[in-house]
Image (cartoon, grey):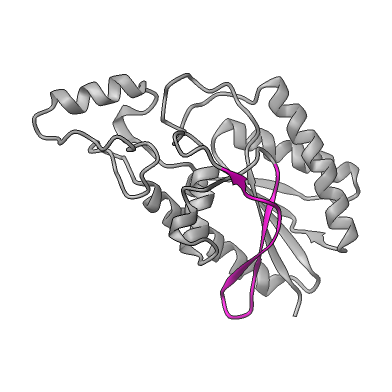
Amino acid sequence: MARTIAALIRHGEYSQQADTPSAHQPYALTVQGKTDVHNEVDSFAVLLDEHSLAIADRVDSSNMLRAWQTAMIFVEKLYKHEMPTLQIDSYDALAERAVGSVANMTIQQIEKIIVEDPRYEEPPQDWKSNSHYCLPFQGAESLIQAGVRVAEHLQLQMQKLRAEVSVDTVKLFVGHGAAFRHAAYHLGILEFEQLAQFSMFHARPVMFEYLDDGSWRHIGGDWKIRNASNGLD
């Protein structure tokens, strides 16, 4: 049977609002971010060619602009490498962890609201990077919950791909570092203790093979050693 491989791609650098933990910011890639994505696609195309891997004709992207722009650069540049894909499909399911009704407020504003609301306990010091902590606001989710959402999407899409292809094929998923990392935990690729150690390089694919028995294995691409004090990746 043909091999089916998921390439998880964290978006390029974008114009992120300072001291703001919401990853649902609607901003575009920076000039440097676009340059980095272009460079990573060239390296990725060489890898695909060396291993005679086909590209799935649909790329799955987060709905965030920075992810869509990253996916578009991959599609356009892979076409120039004679590796065409046909369409980008955008999904809320691939979004980063939601912080709910305090989206795009600063860290200081969020913590002040929590402290001043008698219904809520003070959040732990590491609340931004704590995998299990969920802000007490409507629409918020924990990193673990975001990982479940992304893992379910990956599992479903790769099951479909496995039933469709007859040659070794890579499907691109463009999204966000923390959500992908926690999805990898739910898929049995990372241990829980590794979540605090790793992030993802901007636009550099990390590749996982989806196996016959529904399990996954890491086959290519390096994790980035993560700055544990920064929960905004």
- For the point 70% across and 71% down, the residue is 164
204 vs 67, nearest the viewer: 204
**x, y percent for residue 137:** 24, 36
- For the point 72% across and 37% down, the residue is 72
Quarter of the image for residue 217 reads bottom right
Left or right of 66? Residue 39 is: right
Quarter of the image for residue 189 reads bottom right
Question: Is 94 above or below relative to 220?
Answer: above
212 vs 205, nearest the viewer: 205
84 vs 99, nearest the viewer: 99
Task: Confirm whether the magenta stretch covers residue 98.
Answer: no
> Is residue 42 visible from the viewing direction of this image?
yes
Question: Is 101 above or below relative to 87?
Answer: above
Question: Is 151 above or below relative to 86?
Answer: below
Task: Confirm whether the magenta stretch covers residue 207.
Answer: yes
**x, y percent for residue 19:** 43, 21
- What residue range appears in magenta? 204-225
> Is residue 61 visible from the viewing direction of this image?
no
**x, y percent for residue 101:** 30, 31
Left or right of 4? Residue 157 is: left
- For the point 53% across and 58% down, the residue is 184
- For the point 74% across and 35% down, the residue is 37
